[in-house]
Image (cartoon, rainbow, N blue to C red):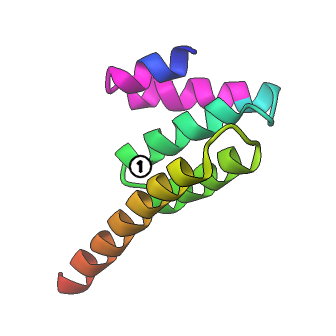
Amino acid sequence: HRASVYSKLGDFTNALADDNKSLSLDSLQRDSYINRSFVYFSLGNFSKAKIDLERGQSLGGIADDQFVKMLNGVMETIQKDLFLELLE
């Protein structure tokens, strides 16, 4: 799926546009939620990354242990980001 290729190339603008388009056509596209979660994470939008990761999990296809590992990574980054904001 093209959005994944854009993501791997670091072209998050086009990846996000493709994922949004895919989800506007079919809101049950698990892979689009998972990829968009990665894009949001890469752009520093951790709350949206978490929401999309959870949506992707709810549609199935992610092993529970893999999901927990991914979600823990997102949550750890959110906590670090919030801590750094407090230091500023």
Q: What residue is drawn where x is 54% and y is 53%?
A: 65
**In what quadrant of the picture does the N terminus appear?**
top right
Residue 28 sits above or below residue 69 on the image: above
Q: Position of residue 87 (x, y in %)?
A: 18, 84
Q: Position of residue 79 (x, y in %)?
A: 35, 74
Q: Furthest-left residue in view?
A: 88
Q: Is residue 57 left or right of residue 80?
A: right
Per the image, label 1 sits on a secondary structure element best described as helix
Q: What residue is drawn where x is 44% and y is 30%?
A: 13
User: Which residue position is annotated with label 1?
Assistant: 41
Q: What residue is drawn where x is 46% and y is 46%?
A: 40
Q: Position of residue 31 (x, y in %)?
A: 63, 31
39 vs 70, nearest the viewer? 70
Query: Does the magenta run of residues contain 24?
Result: no
Callout 1 crowding tier (Cα within 10 Å): few <14, some 14–19, many ≥20: some
57 vs 2, nearest the viewer? 57
Residue 60 sits above or below residue 49 on the image: above
Where residue 50 sits, quadrant-wise, is: bottom right
Instruction: Give the extent of the magenta segment.
Output: 6-22
Q: Is residue 62 left or right of residue 39?
A: right
